[in-house]
């Protein structure tokens, strides 16, 4: 059994998290993007069916949060966050698995779909960097899931 001895300085030292999104626009767009992902406005308003709402929202969020995303993709940060490096390698593997069979269209489409997942992951890990933001995001997510569940129950009982 191994034990670790920590000094008081190591235990009680608060971790300082750099805040690139000082004005909160990236966080606000992340919340709206998550809302469009869960609440799906096109399901509620049929006229919005042809509009790529989620894609536009995530691109806007990526543009506003570009500094945060680029810092996460730096080589030093990728060494500290192996999950991010693994996701990027998985993106390459998705494309290669289709290209081996000569299915270029499938490689392009699969990589595009998976890159949306990676973009959302990078936004969440980059912008939810304070306890307050994590709390607000979790609270919003709970409300969105409750709303979707309530709509499903109302539909189930034909109300």
Image (tube, rainbow, N blue to C red):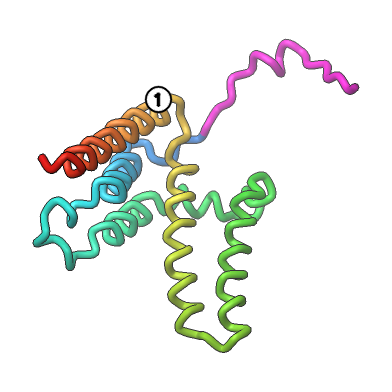
SS for tag 1? helix
Q: Is residue 3 left or right of residue 9?
A: right
Part of the protein shown in magenta: 1-17
Residue at image coords 46%, 47%: 68
The outermost residue toward the top is 8
Between 148 and 33, which is closer to the camera in this rendering?
Answer: 148
Q: Extreme right residue here?
A: 1
User: Which residue is pictured at 64% across the width and 56% down the height?
Assistant: 86
Q: Residue furthest front?
A: 157
Q: Nearer the viewer, residue 64 or 87?
A: 87
Q: Residue at x 11, y 59 (%)?
A: 46
Q: Is residue 112 above or below residue 2?
A: below
Q: Position of residue 4 (x, y in %)?
A: 83, 20
Q: x, y (%) of residue 123?
A: 43, 48
The answer to if 45 sits in the magenta stretch is no
Give the residue number, with chain letter if any, for mark 1. 132
Q: Residue 112: image x %, image y %?
A: 44, 69
Of 81 and 43, the residue lying toward us: 43
Q: Position of residue 36 (x, y in %)?
A: 26, 49
| Residue at 27% over, 60% down | 56
* Left or right relative to 118: residue 155: left
Magenta stretch secondary structure, dominant: loop
Mark 1 neighbour class, 10 Å CA radius: few under 14, some 14 to 19, many 20 or more: few
């Amino acid at each position: 059994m191994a034990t670790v001895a920590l000094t008081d300085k190591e235990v009680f030292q608060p971790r300082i998290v750099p805040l690139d999104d000082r004005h909160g626009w990236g966080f606000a767009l992340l919340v709206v993007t998550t809302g469009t992902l869960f609440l799906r406005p096109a399901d509620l308003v049929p006229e919005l069916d042809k509009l790529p709402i989620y894609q536009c929202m995530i691109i806007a969020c990526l543009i506003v949060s570009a500094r945060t995303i680029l810092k996460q993709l730096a080589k030093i940060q990728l060494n500290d966050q192996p999950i991010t490096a693994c996701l990027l390698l998985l993106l390459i593997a998705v494309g290669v698995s289709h290209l081996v069979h000569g299915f270029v269209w499938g490689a392009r489409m699969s990589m595009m779909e998976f890159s949306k997942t990676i973009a959302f992951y990078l936004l969440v890990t980059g912008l939810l960097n304070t306890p307050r933001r994590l709390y607000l995001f979790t609270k919003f997510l709970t409300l969105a899931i409750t709303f979707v569940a309530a709509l499903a129950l109302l539909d189930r009982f034909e109300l």
